[in-house]
Amino acid sequence: MSNLKKSGNTLIEVGVETNYLEEQSSPDNERYVFAYNVTIYNAGDVAAKLMTRHWIITDANGNVQEVHGEGVVGEKPYLRPGETFEYTSGTVLETPVGSMQGSYQMITDNGLAFDADIPAFTLALPHTLH
């Protein structure tokens, strides 16, 4: 788990693992496909529901894509204290290296809205970075 966001009595941890999808990529066409597996864990003592997401995706050329949307992978997970939600999604870059960061907009049972920040993580072809 790489990020902690505390708001009131709610503590949300977000961890991300990435994977380059060589079989879906086409470097000759500047198409690099990456999967990312996200784990969201409620380490607090109040339940919270993920309402929306906001991603900022940047490639090595400095091109930025922003993605806003309802929930994640068609779901709005409700996490009670101690519960985890995992999902896998993906993105396409024009360069072999890039980064992502963002936030999940959460709401507790008592109506407190807060952002669970997702710190920047790297998307890179294997053996590209040291």
Image: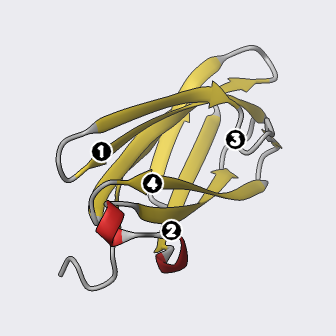
Nearest to the eye among marks 1 and 4: give it: 4
Residue position marked by numbered label 1 in the rendering? 58
Q: Which circle marks residue 17 in the picture?
A: 2
Residue located at (73% from left, 45% from top): 73
Q: Residues within 10 Å of mark 3 (few under 14, many from 20)?
A: some
Q: Nearer the viewer, residue 116 or 25?
A: 25
Residue position marked by numbered label 3 in the rendering? 72
Nearest to the eye among marks 1 and 3: give it: 1
First along the sequence among labels 4 and 2: 2
Residue 103 to residue 37: above or below: above
Mark 3 and mark 2 residues within 8 Å of each other at the beta carbon: no
Q: Give the secondary structure at mark 4.
A: strand
Q: Give the secondary structure at mark 1.
A: strand
Residue 49 in sight from this viewpoint? yes
First along the sequence among labels 3 and 4: 3
Residue position marked by numbered label 4 in the rendering? 92
**As drawn, which residue projects farthest toward the top?**
111
Amino acid on which the number 1 mark rests in the picture: Thr
What is the CA distance from the residue labelled 1 to the residue labelled 4? Answer: 10 Å
Residue located at (45% from left, 51% from top): 3
